[in-house]
């Protein structure tokens, strides 16, 4: 799926200002489930790129992030398999950057975070105008993780050239990193295997560590395609 929408960025290491603008996203989702098994495997690749500016439109920042989600979900079926409920957890690896075009000293900030997130999914199959449809909602919440962060007033030169460690690997939880992510999509049947998907993705990542604050809020309208297929072992 391809997405476009608003982005809100704050990083007090670079600036005390909030920056707002527009960004684009690419999202690829794969879910695997074996017949007669209750557990499924979920993998999601999410890449974002945003150009944002301050209130006076005099300063700009470029933000880019790659998120990889991998996890296991337990499945329940209700109402003759029309309703599917899933619960479990995913590991989220985040890599990215924020670049301030106006800063001459410390113009960029690296983003690196590994997070364990409890996850819930609800999917409902229905028919509209004689066409099979699928509505799906996914919610990811924070639990515990680790992240990289410079300390307040510490430069990257001190970290990487001089090797001056100052609490740069930080434990995170829902208390100091209350990030969450939600996605609502609707699939409309096009052919026997292909479906058109439209939806909304909101990813709200925020941290308060080492006396620094950072958040990247993204809102995306999504459009793309999904395909469902079965893999069967080759006969010997």
Image: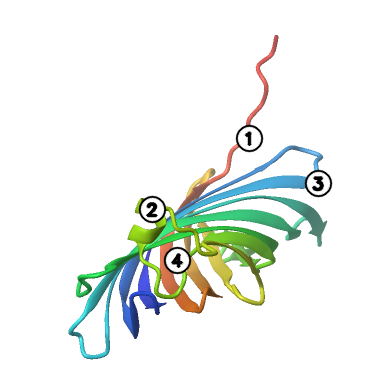
Which class describes the residues within 10 Å of circle 1: few (<14), some (14-19), or many (20+)?
Answer: few
Residue 90 drawn above or below residue 103: above
Mark closer to the chain start, 1 or 2: 2
Outermost residue toward the top in this view? 236
Q: Position of residue 26 (x, y in %)?
A: 40, 56
Residue at 24% x, 70% y is: 105
Determine the CA span between mark 1 and mark 2: 48 Å
The residue at 51%/62% (across/down) is 168
- In the image, which is nearer the foreground, mark 3 or mark 1? 3
Element on which disc 2 rests: helix
As drawn, the label of residue 230 is 1
User: Is tag 3's residue or tag 1's residue first in the polypeptide sequence?
Assistant: 3
Give the CA separation, mark 1 to mark 4.
47 Å
- Give the foreground label among 1 and 2: 2
The residue at which mark 3 appears reads as: 38
- Kindly identify which numbered label has been placed on residue 207: none
**In the rendered image, which quarter contains the C terminus?**
top right
Chain-order first, disc 3 or disc 4: 3
3 vs 4, front mark: 4
The quadrant of the image that shows the N terminus is bottom left
Q: Residue at x 69, y 13 (%)?
A: 235
Front: mark 3 or 2: 2
From the viewer's perspective, tell me whether residue 99 is left or right of residue 200: left
């Amino acid at each position: 799926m391809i997405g476009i929408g608003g982005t809100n960025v704050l990083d007090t290491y670079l600036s005390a200002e909030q920056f707002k603008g527009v960004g684009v996203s690419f999202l690829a989702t794969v879910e695997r489930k074996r017949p007669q098994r209750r557990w499924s495997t979920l993998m999601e690749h999410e890449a974002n790129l945003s150009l944002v500016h301050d209130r006076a439109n005099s300063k700009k920042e470029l933000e880019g992030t790659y998120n990889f989600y991998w996890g296991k979900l337990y499945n329940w079926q209700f109402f003759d398999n029309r309703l599917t409920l899933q619960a479990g957890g995913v590991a989220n690896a985040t890599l990215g950057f924020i670049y301030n075009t106006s800063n001459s000293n410390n113009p960029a900030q690296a983003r690196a975070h590994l997070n364990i997130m409890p996850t819930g999914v609800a999917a409902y199959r229905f028919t509209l105008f004689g066409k099979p449809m699928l509505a799906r909602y996914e919610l990811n919440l924070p639990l515990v993780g680790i992240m990289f962060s410079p300390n307040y007033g510490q430069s990257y030169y001190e970290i990487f050239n001089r090797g001056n460690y100052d609490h740069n690997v930080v434990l995170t939880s829902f208390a100091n990193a209350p990030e969450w992510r939600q996605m609502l999509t609707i699939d409309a049947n096009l052919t026997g295997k292909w479906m058109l998907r439209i939806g909304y993705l909101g990813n709200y990542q925020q941290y308060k560590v080492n006396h620094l604050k950072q958040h990247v809020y993204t809102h995306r309208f999504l459009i793309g395609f999904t395909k469902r297929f079965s893999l069967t072992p080759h006969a010997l």
